[in-house]
């Protein structure tokens, strides 16, 4: 057994070994935060100690000149993330209407917006695209929430200024920035499955500028199943470091953002053995990502004088390296069996680019914006794979060495205007160019939306968009599933709905939206051939999202989504898309400094397709998961203690056959800040 193999075997059989250097590094960040916090002796309320880094945002939804009519935008704030104890982006969004977070065969939580997977949704961190250059999907569990001020989710139709790839919508992550004074936070928690979290940050601002520095370490040996055993190969570890700097000089504002990531994780195999020949279960595979390292950086400049004209420019780079190993046994220490397709892949990917935006505000005659951008997606794939057929169900090894790349260019213009006092319009057009190294394509995008203020507190809205998404590097060139003949996706999305603030209850809101999204050439992994292919897909349904401050000590919000996701080539439902999703979340404060926060999610009526007979489907059991969190606040010390129970009633459920979700998990912790 090689040295790397011995390390992997030790990680699995003897428990995940803590990387002392990384823990010490993150602890040092936390200690620095604690020390600066203690020295500052600041009585500023927690909600006012940090602000939002809006400089890198492509569209600032709170700014009148940017207000996009007909667009459905939902937001979750840092305070709301703290209330439910969300530690990563997927946990922050898992109770929002229209969202389904599921963990599939790759062991990574995936955020589905209105039935469309993550590669159909652009994820931005301060305007930097996080979608992996390889498969167009980023692991949201690698993004910690302690650095985030707000997450805006735009479902369906979105501004053309975001560029291509927004068929499903946009997830816009806005990070924290420093405010006047010097502040710090420290957080630590532990729980079931040897789960640990340590995070710290320090921030501040003065006349010269502002800064925010945060670091965190999180690890687990794996999540527990309903029988109390640990899910095989479900261990994870991540270490994050984040920094942003800001400087304002008159009409000019400058910003610099940088982040580092170091992580590893197992990919839990199916609990159904391949020898069982279950037609609905994927084949049992033993795979690990023992090294995930990356970093991103961006530079932002904004010119906003006292006048109608403003301009912004951003340059960015986002790099990720993954070592992906698939073994031939459950000990994760062998790749020698010639009857099993194994591999050792080293994937280096990079996304870099630049964009600019010019805006002129005509006052009562509206605001006109123009955006220009370019982006390069590159990959180097190295290593080896055992997939060369030798006959008699045996395979030989071939070496991997490829450097595919994609270039995308776009320009867009958007006009926002209110021709009448109660009517607000948005019109947008965009042009895109795509070069995959062998051919070049050009296509267009468009969006039109209208808001109509019918009565005080009641607004009707409607919108239409035509969007484009080009294939990713994985979809085109993957060694096992790639298809160079793939065509770009085109979508036509219609929405209509209303927002109502009942006047007797000004702290209440009801939002209803109906949508119809036809995606032509929808790119999906074929369940029988395991090759990416083009299909036409139709997603239609509606969402109801109420929220209300029922009493001074009781806040409730919920959401119901009805959704049909149909493969139009067969007329059958698409796999793992629930027709009914219900979320209910509430916070009750029985005493001034005590809070009880609970949330429940219910998923019903979803199917999976046979891996051998594509016209046969099986219904998955419906399931509900209940979570509860109790916290005690110590406001005079800016401190809080909490205990949280996830899957409180230990409900057994599966995302797909052989892929069970976590059972009951208990977590406790505390935080302090100044």
Image (cartoon, rainbow, N blue to C red):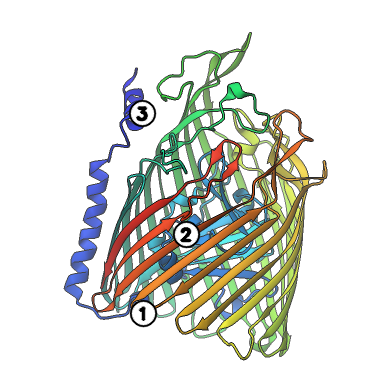
Q: Where is residue 554 shown, x and y percent of the image?
A: 48, 78
For disc 1, the marked residue is 591
Q: Where is residue 48 shown, x and y percent of the image?
A: 36, 78
Q: On the rendered structure, is 199 left or right of 41?
A: right
Q: Where is residue 14 shown, x and y percent of the image?
A: 30, 31
Q: Where is residue 450 shown, x and y percent of the image?
A: 74, 76
| Camera-side mark, 3 or 1 | 1
For disc 3, the marked residue is 8
Q: Name the quarter where the N terminus is drawn.
A: top left
**For residue 421, above or below residue 663:** below
- Closer to us: 404 or 181: 181
- The local crowd at label 1, few if under 14, some if 14 to 19, many if 20 or more residues have their Cα within 10 Å, is few
- Give the quadrant of residue 227: top left
| Camera-side mark, 2 or 3 | 2
Of callouts 2 and 3, the N-terminal one: 3
Q: On the rendered structure, is 421 left or right of 304?
A: right
- Mark 3 vs mark 1, CA separation in Å: 49 Å
The numbered disc on residue 627 is 2
Q: Name the quarter where the C terminus is drawn.
A: bottom left
Q: Secondary structure at mark 2?
A: strand
Is residue 255 something that shows in the picture? Answer: no
**For residue 361, above or below residue 58:** below
Q: On the rendered structure, is 210 left or right of 473?
A: left
Is residue 632 something that shows in the picture? Answer: yes
Instruction: Tell whether label 3 touches label 2 (CB within 8 Å).
Output: no
């Amino acid at each position: 057994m090689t040295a790397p193999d011995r390390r992997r075997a030790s990680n699995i059989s003897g428990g995940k070994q803590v990387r002392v250097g990384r823990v010490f590094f993150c602890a040092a960040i936390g200690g620095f935060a604690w020390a600066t916090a203690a020295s500052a002796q600041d009585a500023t309320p927690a909600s006012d100690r940090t602000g939002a880094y809006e400089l890198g945002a492509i569209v600032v939804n709170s700014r009148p000149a940017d207000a996009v009519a007909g667009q459905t935008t939902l937001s979750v704030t840092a305070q709301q993330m703290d209330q439910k104890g969300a530690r990563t982006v997927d946990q922050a969004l898992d109770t929002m209407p229209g969202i389904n977070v599921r963990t599939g065969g790759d062991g990574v939580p995936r955020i589905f917006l209105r039935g469309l997977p993550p590669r159909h949704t652009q994820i931005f961190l301060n305007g930097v695209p996080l979608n992996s250059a390889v498969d167009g999907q980023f692991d949201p569990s690698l993004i910690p929430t302690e650095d985030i001020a707000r997450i805006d989710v735009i479902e369906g139709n979105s501004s053309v200024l975001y560029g291509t790839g927004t068929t499903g919508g946009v997830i816009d992550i806005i990070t924290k920035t420093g405010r006047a004074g010097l502040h710090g936070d420290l957080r630590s928690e532990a729980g079931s499955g040897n789960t640990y979290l340590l995070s710290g940050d320090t921030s501040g601002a003065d006349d010269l500028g502002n800064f925010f520095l945060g670091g965190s370490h999180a690890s687990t040996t794996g999540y527990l199943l309903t029988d109390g055993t640990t899910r095989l190969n479900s261990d994870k570890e991540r270490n994050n470091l984040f920094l942003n700097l800001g400087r304002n000089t008159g009409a000019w504002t400058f910003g610099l953002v940088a982040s580092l990531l170091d992580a590893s994780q197992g990919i839990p195999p199916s609990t159904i053995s391949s020898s069982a020949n279950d037609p609905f279960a994927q084949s049992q595979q033993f795979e690990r990502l023992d090294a995930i390292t990356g970093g991103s950086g961006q530079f932002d400049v904004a010119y906003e004088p006292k006048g109608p004209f403003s301009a912004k420019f951003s340059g960015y780079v986002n790099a990720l390296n993954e070592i992906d190993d698939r073994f031939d046994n459950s000990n994760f220490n062998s790749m020698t069996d010639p009857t099993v397709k194994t591999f050792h892949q080293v994937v280096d990917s990079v996304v870099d680019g630049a964009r600019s935006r010019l805006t002129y505000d005509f006052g009562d005659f509206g605001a006109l914006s123009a955006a220009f951008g370019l982006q390069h997606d590159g990959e180097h794939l190295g290593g080896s794979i055992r997939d060369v057929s030798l006959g008699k169900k045996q395979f030989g090894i071939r070496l991997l060495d490829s450097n595919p790349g994609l270039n995308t260019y776009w320009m867009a213009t958007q006009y926002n205007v209110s021709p009448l006092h109660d009517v607000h319009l948005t019109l947008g057009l965009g042009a895109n160019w795509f070069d995959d190294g062998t051919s070049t394509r050009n296509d267009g995008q468009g969006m039109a939306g209208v808001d109509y203020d019918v009565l005080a507190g009641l607004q009707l809205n409607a919108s239409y968009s035509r969007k484009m998404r080009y294939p990713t590097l994985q979809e085109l060139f993957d060694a096992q599933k790639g298809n160079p003949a793939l065509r770009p996706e085109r979508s036509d999305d219609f929405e209509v709905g209303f927002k109502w603030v009942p006047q007797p209850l000004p702290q209440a809101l009801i939002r209803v939206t109906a949508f119809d999204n036809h995606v032509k050439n929808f790119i999906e992994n074929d369940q029988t051939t395991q090759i990416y292919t083009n299909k036409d897909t139709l997603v239609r349904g509606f969402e109801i999202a109420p929220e209300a401050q029922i009493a001074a000590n009781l806040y409730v919000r919920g959401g119901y989504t009805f959704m049909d996701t149909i493969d139009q080539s067969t007329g059958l439902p698409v796999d793992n898309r629930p027709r009914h999703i219900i979320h209910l979340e509430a916070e009750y404060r029985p005493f001034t400094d005590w809070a009880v926060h609970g949330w429940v999610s219910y998923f019903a009526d979803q199917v999976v397709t046979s891996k051998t007979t594509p016209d046969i489907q099986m219904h998955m059991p419906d399931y509900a998961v209940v979570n509860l969190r109790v916290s005690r606040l110590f406001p005079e010390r800016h401190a809080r203690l909490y205990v949280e129970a996830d899957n409180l009633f230990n409900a057994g459920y599966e995302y797909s056959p052989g892929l069970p979700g976590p059972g009951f998990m208990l977590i406790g912790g505390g935080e302090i800040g100044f």
